[in-house]
Amino acid sequence: MANVFYMELNDLNYELERSAEILRVLAHPVRLQIVHQLLEKNALNVTELQKILKLPQSTVSQHLHKMRNHKVLSHERKGTEVFYRVDDKQVKQTVHILMG
């Protein structure tokens, strides 16, 4: 019985740690805008995001890199382009809560 309790506690701790990590990564207006666009349009590459957000390509790339490293975004290479999307259910839920 004690093992079940510790397993549930470990699962809860993992969920809380992941939630905190997601919030830390999304704690920048540009990153929130990027995730919002990806949720609306499903998948976009850097050039498409750069045009939508009217930001330098290097700025968009830096934010994508950070979110990708923290597994907030997933990506898929198609030829020479990389398309980004939000697949993580917890990230989607967090963004919907934040964006109202």
Image (spheres, rainbow, N blue to C red):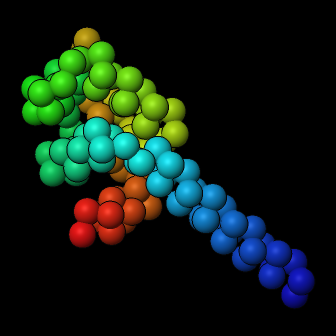
In the foreground, 92 or 51? 51
Q: Position of residue 86 (x, y in %)?
A: 33, 47
Residue 61's spot in the image, x, y percent? Answer: 33, 22
The location of residue 22, given as percent across then percent down, is 48, 52
Q: 51 above or below 87?
A: above
Residue 54 located left or right of residue 17: left
Q: As drawn, which residue projects farthest toward the top?
A: 80
Q: Residue at x 25, y 62 (%)?
A: 99
Give the left or right position of residue 94, taking residue 29 as reference. right
Q: Quadrant of residue 41?
A: top left
Residue 26 shown left or right of residue 49 in the figure: right
Q: State the residue at coordinates (40%, 48%).
A: 26
Image quarter for residue 64? top left
Q: Is residue 42 above or below residue 57?
A: below
Can residue 89 be seen by looking at this rendering? no
The residue positioned 75% from the left and 74% from the top of the image is 9
For the residue pair 37 and 54, the one nearer the viewer reads as 54
Quadrant that contains the N terminus? bottom right
Q: Is residue 91 above or below residue 1?
A: above
